[in-house]
Amino acid sequence: MFVASAAQSLRDFLKEESAGGVVLMVAAACALVLANSPLAAAYNSALATEIALTVGGAGIEKPALLWINDGLMALFFFLVGLEVKREVLTGQLSSWKQSSLPLFAAIGGMVLPALVFVAINWNQPENLAGWAVPAATDIAFALGILALLGSRVPVALKALLLAIAVIDDIGAIVIIALFYTPSVDVSMLLGAVGVFAVLLAIGKARVGSSLPYVILGAALWFFVLKSGVHATLAGVALAITVPMNDRKGRDVLERMEHGLHPWVAFLVVPVFALANAGVSFAGMELSAFAAPLPMGIALGLFVGKQLGIFGFAWAAARTGIASLPEGISWKQVYGLSLIAGIGFTMSLFIGNLAFASADQIAAVKLGVISGSLVAALAGIFILRNAESNPQ
């Protein structure tokens, strides 16, 4: 019964994630159209509009773009945290047998893209902060592409991609925490630790109501934002405190995950794409694609991802450390490694953390979009011609 329920939950998740990927593609396309239309000035002005939230004279004032990137995306990271916790406790990462192949594949898929980027930008020290940009995989976008291929892609291959992307997300979270936190306000960080401790106690008591997590989660986000640590990490910290079940044995984590997922898939991530994917091509020459920053990102996603994921997975299976899931061929794994080169959401997010210059951020967008597009097209071509074969 448990196995059947878990399998159905995975199928439902993949279906919803795939649909969200299609919406994400539409939002990204709209951003590109707006940025290259007569509405470009209004589009940029709207994102730069200052929005203030104050209580008793104290509060936060940020441009709309940062409310999206720091605020709305905290919900995205909260959902990621819930997904990671579930996968580690009961899902694809709950045993060494299940997690070994995606673990090695994900490590390769983070290390090789970073090395490709650094190799191309070695003589451009001002660009090296972007080394982590091509290390990320956009699971919604990737599963959206797989959804377009229909029955040619078995559920087992989608599950493998999901497991790789979850580990990839863990890596991205660690990278953001360690390398993209410029300074820390200790008093605010202590406030965040205090709120986190209360949340841990509530979770330990297996409180099932969402209300205390919402209220204290908002306080945690505020303290983390003010501390200098990126505010979205508050979402991950909050997810850690959510129990699997309440005192009566009812699902808490899965209920929150399923309740939040449609909002993230169909609102949060598309709004992020609409706000961040707009790059103007006005006056741009083809040589712009060959500049070290966008080229490093594009080749990191297209070349680094496929070499890292496929190469590390093959090596792990060849040495007996891991095994290929039943019914999946190596050609399909290669196609998956190409599809995993779609960085988009997390790549753009890290790019915004890595650079402050408008020109560099525009170059990041150019590299992410071009690299993701080429990886998607190549992956579609391979998977359309791949068959599910027993080993």
Image (cartoon, helix red, strand yellow):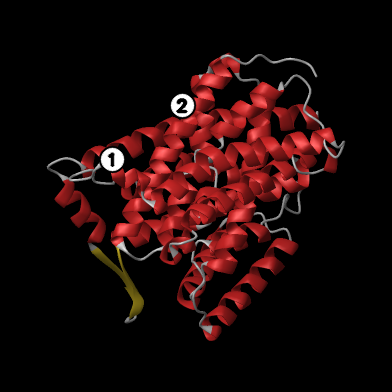
- Mark 1–mark 2 distance (CA, rounded to whole Å): 20 Å
> Dots 1 and 2: beta carbons under 8 Å?
no
Residue, x 55% and y 49% (percent of image)?
Answer: 116
- Name the quarter where the N terminus is drawn: top right
Q: Mark 1: which secondary structure?
A: helix
In the picture provided, is 135 more to the left or to the right than 318?
left
Instruction: Report if residue 294 is visible in the image.
Output: yes
Numbered badge on residue 377: 2
Amino acid type at mark 2: Leu
Q: Residue 231, position in %: x, y?
A: 49, 66
Amino acid type at mark 1: Leu
Labels 1, 2: front one: 1
Q: Residue 282, position in %: x, y?
A: 18, 44
In the picture provided, is 279 more to the left or to the right than 316?
left
- Name the quarter where the C terminus is drawn: top right
Circle 2 crowding by C-alpha within 10 Å: few under 14, some 14–19, many from 20: few
